[in-house]
Image (spheres, helix red, strand yellow):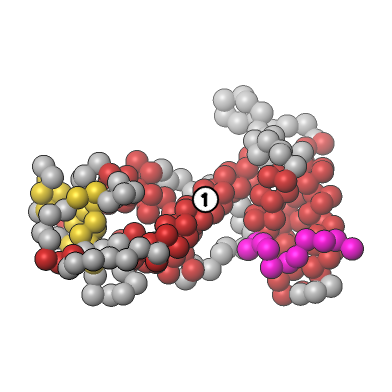
Amino acid sequence: MYKIRLEHFEGPLDLLLFFIKRDELNIYDIPISKITKEFLEYVNYIRMLDLETAGEFILMASTLMHIKVRMLLPREVDEKGEEIDPRADLVRALLEYKRYKEVSEELSFLESNQRKISYRGNFSADPIEAPNEYGILLKNVTVYDIAKAFRKVIEGIKPEPVHQIRKINITIEEQMNYILSKINEYTNLHFLTLVHGMKEKIRVVITFIAILELVKMQKIGLKESSNFNDFVIYKINNGKHI
C-alpha cells in the first residue's frame, strides 16, 4: 500500500516538490523516469479514493509521460541553435510554485508569532513611522494584517489546470516599478485594488514580495484599511508620508 496521505498535498506540483526534496534531487536536472514512476504509483492510489481530485494529478501524469517520451527523442533547438530541454517548462512551474510555497510558509510563521504578541498603548496616537522587527514600515497595521490580506487573495485564486504549464513573464523589479507607477495615480492604493484581476498565484506572490522590498527601501509604507482583509499602500519621499 502506498503510504503517502492524500491531504498532505495541495496539488500535483506540491507532490513533485515532495519527491524532489525527499530524494534530494536537483530541481534543474529532474530524473524524469524515476519521478514519473513514483508519480504514477501515487495517481493509481488516489484514483481509488477520490476521482474528482485525481483528475488534476492524472493530467500532470500525462504531462510527465509526454516529457519522458521527448527525452528519448533528438532534442529540438531554439533560434540560437541551443538544445531545448523538454523539462524546462516543468522546472519553471516547480520553481514558481516553490517560491509561492516558501512565501506562504513564511507568512504563516509571521502570523503565528504576531498572535503571541501583546500590544500596549494606542498605535494611532503615535504619528512616528518606524520599521518593525521584520524591517517593514508599518503605520497602524501589523504583520498579521498584511499576511492575512495576502492569504485571503491567494486562497481566492483557483489554480489553473496543470496541463497548462507556462512561464509567467514577470519579475520582482518589474512589479516594483508597476507599484510605484500606481502609487503616483492613487494617494492611497489599496492592496486589493492593486492585485485585482491577477489570476495566477505566482503573480500575486511576486507583487507581494515587491511591496515588501519597496517598504524596506522606504519608498512606500503600509497602513490600516477600513476593510479587515486589506491594507493601504502609500508613497514615501525622504522618509515622509506623502
For the image, the number of numbered tags is 1
- Return the x and y of residue 2 as percentages of the image width and height: 85, 61
- Residue 236 vs 76, above or below: the answer is below
Q: Quadrant of residue 101?
A: bottom right
Segment colored magenta: 1-11
In the image shown, does 130 or 191 lie closer to the viewer?
Answer: 130
Quarter of the image where one finds residue 147: bottom left
Q: Does the magenta run of residues contain 102?
A: no
Residue at 82%, 43% (x, y): give it.
34
The residue lying toward the viewer, choosing from 148 and 126, is 126
The quadrant of the picture occupied by the C terminus is bottom left
Please identify the dominant SS of the magenta region.
Answer: loop
Q: From this viewpoint, is residue 63 visible?
A: yes
Does residue 153 show up? Answer: no
Name the one closer to the observer, 205 or 130: 130
Q: Residue furthest right?
A: 1
Q: Is residue 6 magenta?
A: yes
Query: Mark 1: few, some, or many residues within 10 Å (few <14, many ≥20)?
Result: few
Which residue is depicted at the point 19% across and 50% down? 130
What kind of element bears circle 1?
helix
What residue does disc 1 label? 102
Q: Horizontal and vertical percent for residue 67? A: 74, 45
- Identify which residue is drawn at 89% across, 63% down: 1
Residue 195: horizontal and vertical position, in percent? 35, 62
Side (left or right) of 32 relative to 17: right
Q: Nearer the viewer, residue 80 or 165?
A: 165
| Location of residue 84 with respect to 134 vertically, above or below | above
Q: Position of residue 108 (x, y in %)?
A: 47, 60
**Residue 65 left/right relative to 10:** right
Q: Which residue is found at the position 16% from the left and 53% from the top? A: 129
For the residue marked with disc 1, what is the amino acid? Glu
